Image (tube, helix red, strand yellow):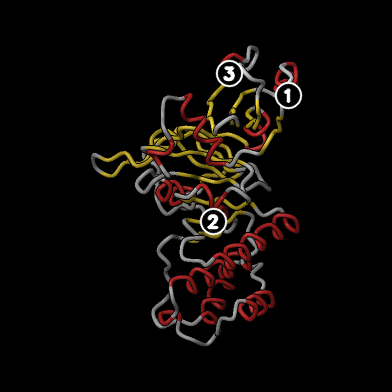
Amino acid sequence: MIEAVNLTKRFEDITAVDHINAEIRDGSVFGLIGTNGAGKSTFLRLASGVLKPDEGSITIDGQEVFENRTAKKRFFYISDDQYFFSNSTPGEMMVYYGKIYPGFDRERFHRLMKAFGLDEKRKIRTFSKGMKKQVSVICGVCAGTDYLFCDETFDGLDPVMRQAVKSIFAEDMEDRNLTPIIASHNLRELEDICDHVGLLHKGGILLSKDLDDMKLNIHKIQCVLPDGLEPDQLAGLSMVSIERRGRLCLLTVRGTREEIEKVIASYDPVFYECIPLTLEEIFISETEVAGYDIRKLIL
């Protein structure tokens, strides 16, 4: 488990990470959402030991990360700005990482490079941004580490490659309990892969919750009510938002699905059904309660 306690990092008069407390459980996908400048990259650099905290701590199973070689062997960091040795090829990077990570799977590296259509002998500096990201991801999953830190990893990948990378992450989570920590400014990129999402704003975590917990406690109801009955007259519902499209009403309501449907059914509606909320809709509802409008923060 990765744990941050009062984690703080300042750059002169700028507080990039501001007293963050967070737990990242093993075997889950932790999504870190936020605008540019919210502190996502700084958090990952602190987690990877690139930066030293000014206050607080960040540990992997109780071990401080900064200047700790044992802890650093347990993760692979894929930065937003791809870095490779000058004039190196993917094959040469494989040899390099193989010396750092004892469990580096060279056979899998060759297999994935071939599957992604990448030339191991070609100079990486001649690759496109998306191709460089693919090489980084391949090196990351082949390193065999417990954790994978991904900073805007899906940025620059086409839709097919994004799904391919997500499938690889899912496979490694099932096979060896990999824990990816993925930082992104785009909620939609993480909707189908994350178990837990933290919203970072101005260096602090505004909201951090399990997606399943959020989905169980907030629902969207699509319904057509009897003539003369308005949505705001539905007593017994904790209404978050109401949207009208002619006679069709879209209600976002807090509570369990069973409780909500029982109340709706008691009013004998012409039609109703419970439809799934998107991650974006869930976060809009949760952050509005905290006094923020997520649409102004990250959408």
Q: CA distance from mark 3 to mark 1?
A: 17 Å
- Residue at image location 57% in from the left, 55% down from the top: 70
Residue marked by disc 2: 72
Q: Nearer the viewer, mark 2 or mark 3?
A: 3
Return the residue found at the far front.
227
Compared with 299, 107 (above or below) is below
Question: Sequence-wise, which precedes: disc 1 or disc 2?
Answer: 2
**Which class describes the residues within 10 Å of circle 2: few (<14), some (14-19), or many (20+)?**
many
**Quadrant position of the N terminus in the picture:** top right
Residue at the image position 39 percent from the left and 50 percent from the top: 51
* Residue 19 picture quarter: top left
Q: Which mark is residue 261?
A: 1
| Quadrant hosting residue 134 | bottom right
Q: Secondary structure at mark 2?
A: helix
**131 with respect to 73 (left or right):** left
From the viewer's perspective, is the residue at label 3 or at label 1 nearer? Answer: 3
Cβ–Cβ under 8 Å for marks 2 and 3? no
The disc label shown at residue 44, or none: none
Residue type at mark 1: give it: Glu
- Residue 93 x, y percent position in the rendering: 52, 76
Residue type, mark 2 in image: Lys
Q: Is residue 52 above or below residue 202?
A: below
Q: Which mark is residue 230?
A: 3
The amino acid pointed to by label 3 is: Glu
Q: Secondary structure at mark 3?
A: loop
Structural distance between the alpha carbons of marks 1 and 2: 50 Å
* Residue 158 visible in the snapshot: yes
